[in-house]
């Protein structure tokens, strides 16, 4: 993890953030209240696996479609950790 001074080989070679979400990634869907950089910086500093961050379509309770954000994680435990901490980093 970057905040502990450990070098991640995926960061060194630019392979940590992927451009598309592979089917084996665990996704977390949410509405974004801050800018993208705050979320991706937190992921880079606190997690160590590969991740994807981008737009997704969410179906609301009244069956309407809205545009939201999603983060996908290769390590499923990191998706759980991210979803637990999301309300603290994704606030005004």
Image (cartoon, rainbow, N blue to C red):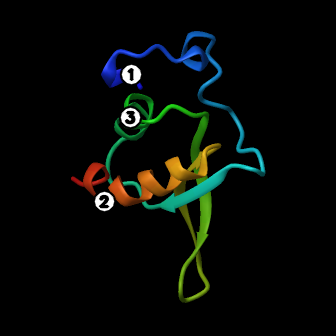
Residue 15: percent from the left, percent from the top? 65, 21
Q: What is the C-alpha distance between the residues marked 3 and 2?
A: 15 Å
Secondary structure of the residue carrying tag 1 is helix
Q: CA distance from mark 3 to mark 1?
A: 7 Å
Residue beneath the point at 66% across and 31% down:
18
Residue 51 position in % (x across, y down)? 59, 38
Q: Residues within 10 Å of mark 3 (few under 14, many from 20)?
A: some
Q: Which residue is mark 2?
A: 87
Q: Quadrant of the N terminus?
A: top left
Q: Residue at x 60, y 19 (%)?
A: 10
Numbered mark located on residue 2 in the image: 1
Tell me if 55 is positioned left or right of 40 in this view.
right
- Residue 58, by quadrant, is bottom right
In the image, 4 versus 39, the foreground residue is 4
Q: Is residue 46 above or below residue 56?
A: above
Q: Earlier in the sequence, mark 3 or mark 2?
A: 3
Estimate the spatial distance between the alpha carbons at disc 2 and disc 1, rounded to whole Å.
22 Å
Residue at which label 3 appears = 46
């Amino acid at each position: 993890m970057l905040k502990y001074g450990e070098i991640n080989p995926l960061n060194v070679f630019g392979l940590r953030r992927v451009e598309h979400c592979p089917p084996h990634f665990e996704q977390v869907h949410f509405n974004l209240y801050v800018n993208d950089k705050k979320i991706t910086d937190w992921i880079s500093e606190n997690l160590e696996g590969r991740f994807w961050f981008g737009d997704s379509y969410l179906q609301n309770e009244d069956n309407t479609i809205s545009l939201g954000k999603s983060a996908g994680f290769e390590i499923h435990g990191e998706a759980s950790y991210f979803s637990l901490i999301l309300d603290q980093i994704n606030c005004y």
